[in-house]
Structures are given as structure tokens and as C-alpha cells.
């Protein structure tokens, strides 16, 4: 896959996550994840010198997991990454709104763990949304209110230098969750905007 990226984008650096939610998908411990990183990433860096590698790509912020990785990763990551979802489908609207504020606590926690490890790299939130499931059942204006609060939160964290990137999941329908189509896409199959997409593209 990286060879293909090298061919398609022949100049400039590019960013790569080592794994994807291995703590959730595979139950991989921090020590096992880090051992894999230390085995594979040195070779990948030699073969693909323009690639910048990040981890541990947890399904949610996990301070102890992150610190273990930061202290033992060799080579050190070029960035750290994890995913952020505020709530689940069964959560109340208020709970989903209130838990957007947790993202600031997590960003601060990540910085604290980097300080403990003795070095600082950028933080990437490579998936975020209200929940990892489906927009169905959420009504206007709540989904717009939630999305605006989320975008404001990321903007504030970026302005403060606490995160470098926050990537919405997802642009279009991608696969299934618990056997059902997922999820919080910005575009419907007919290319019209979802309720969230309307807010996302509305601008400040």
C-alpha cells in the first residue's frame, strides 16, 4: 500500500497510522502494539522515507496506553493519534452535547503524557463524530446543534495548538456497524447533504 502511495504521490511527505483501533478490534495491549511498532516501523521508514508514522490509533483516548507507547516506541512517533466519539446511540441528547467537552480533557491529557515521556509531537484525531453508529433517529435541529458544538471545540483546540488535525468520520457511507449500514456520513447516497453535512459545510 505504501508503495502505491509513493507512486501516486511522488513528492512530499505523507502521514500513515500504524494500525487502526487495534485495542478494540484485536484486544491488543499497549506492550504488544508497541512491540509491533518497534518491529515494523524501522523497516517501513527505510523503504518509504517520506512516510511519517503515528500511533497508537486507539478507539478512544487512553492515557496509560499512550504513555506506554510514547516511552517505548523506537523510533519515536512523528505524531500521536486516537479517535473521539462523544456518546452512543442510546445516550441522551444532553449527554452527547455535554461530552464534547471531554475532548479538551483528552487533548490536555495527551500533552501531559508527552511531557512525562519527555518529548512533544503533534496530536491527530483521525476519526471523530457523535457516535460510531448511525445518524438515523437524530432530528433537526439537535444534530446541527451538536455538530456546531463539535466544530467549535475542534477549532478552539486547534487554535490553542493542542491538536494538529481533526478528521470527521465519515464523508460518505462506509461499511456496516453491527450488521447495519453506518453511519454519520456527510453525504447521502444521492449526493445530497445529510443533516450533519448541512452544518459541516455551512461555515462558521
Image: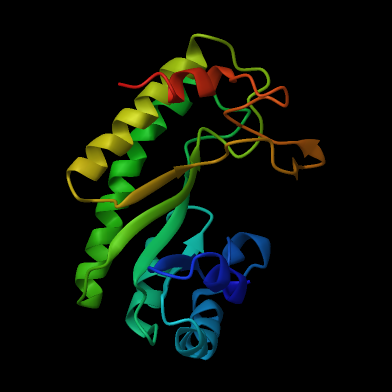
Q: Residue at x 53, y 73 (%)?
A: 6
Q: Nearer the viewer, residue 150 or 52?
A: 52
**The N terminus lies in quadrant:** bottom right
Q: Residue at x 38, y 68 (%)?
A: 12
How many numbered marks appear? 0
**Residue 44 at what x, y percent from top left?**
51, 84
Where is 130 relative to 79, above or below?
above
Based on the displayed image, in which of its 4 quarters is residue 202 positioned?
top left
**Residue 64 at what x, y percent from top left?**
39, 67
**Residue 15 at what x, y percent from top left?**
43, 65
Position of 84 compared to 178: left or right? left
Where is 18 relative to 146, above or below?
below
Position of 129 compared to 148: left or right? right
| Residue farthest along the top direction in this orientation | 141
Q: Residue at x 52, y 23 (%)?
A: 197
**Residue 52 at what x, y percent from top left?**
40, 72
Instruction: Name the colour scheme.
Output: rainbow
Q: Nearer the viewer, residue 201 or 151?
A: 201
Q: Residue at x 38, y 22 (%)?
A: 148
Based on the displayed image, in which of its 4 quarters is residue 119 positioned?
bottom left
| Residue farthest along the right direction in this orientation | 179
**The C terminus lies in quadrant:** top left
Amino acid at each position: 500500500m505504501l508503495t502505491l502511495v509513493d507512486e501516486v504521490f511522488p513528492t512530499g511527505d505523507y502521514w500513515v497510522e500504524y494500525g487502526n483501533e487495534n485495542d478494540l478490534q484485536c484486544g491488543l495491549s499497549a506492550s504488544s502494539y508497541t512491540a509491533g511498532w518497534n518491529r515494523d516501523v524501522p523497516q517501513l521508514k527505510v523503504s518509504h522515507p517520506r512516510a511519517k508514522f503515528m500511533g497508537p490509533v486507539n478507539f478512544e483516548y487512553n492515557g496509560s496506553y499512550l504513555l506506554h507507547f510514547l516511552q517505548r516506541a523506537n523510533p519515536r512517533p512523528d505524531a500521536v493519534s486516537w479517535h473521539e466519539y462523544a456518546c452512543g446511540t442510546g445516550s441522551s441528547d444532553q449527554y452527547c452535547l455535554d461530552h464534547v467537552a471531554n475532548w479538551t480533557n483528552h487533548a490536555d491529557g495527551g500533552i501531559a503524557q508527552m511531557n512525562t515521556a519527555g518529548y512533544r509531537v503533534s496530536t491527530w484525531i483521525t476519526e471523530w463524530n457523535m457516535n460510531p453508529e448511525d445518524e438515523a433517529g437524530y432530528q433537526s435541529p439537535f444534530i446541527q446543534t451538536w455538530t456546531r458544538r463539535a466544530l467549535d471545540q475542534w477549532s478552539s483546540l486547534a487554535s490553542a495548538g493542542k491538536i494538529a488535525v481533526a478528521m470527521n468520520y465519515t464523508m460518505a457511507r462506509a461499511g456496516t456497524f453491527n450488521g447495519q449500514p453506518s453511519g454519520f456520513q456527510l453525504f447521502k447516497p444521492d449526493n445530497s447533504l445529510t443533516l450533519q453535512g448541512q452544518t459541516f459545510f455551512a461555515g462558521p
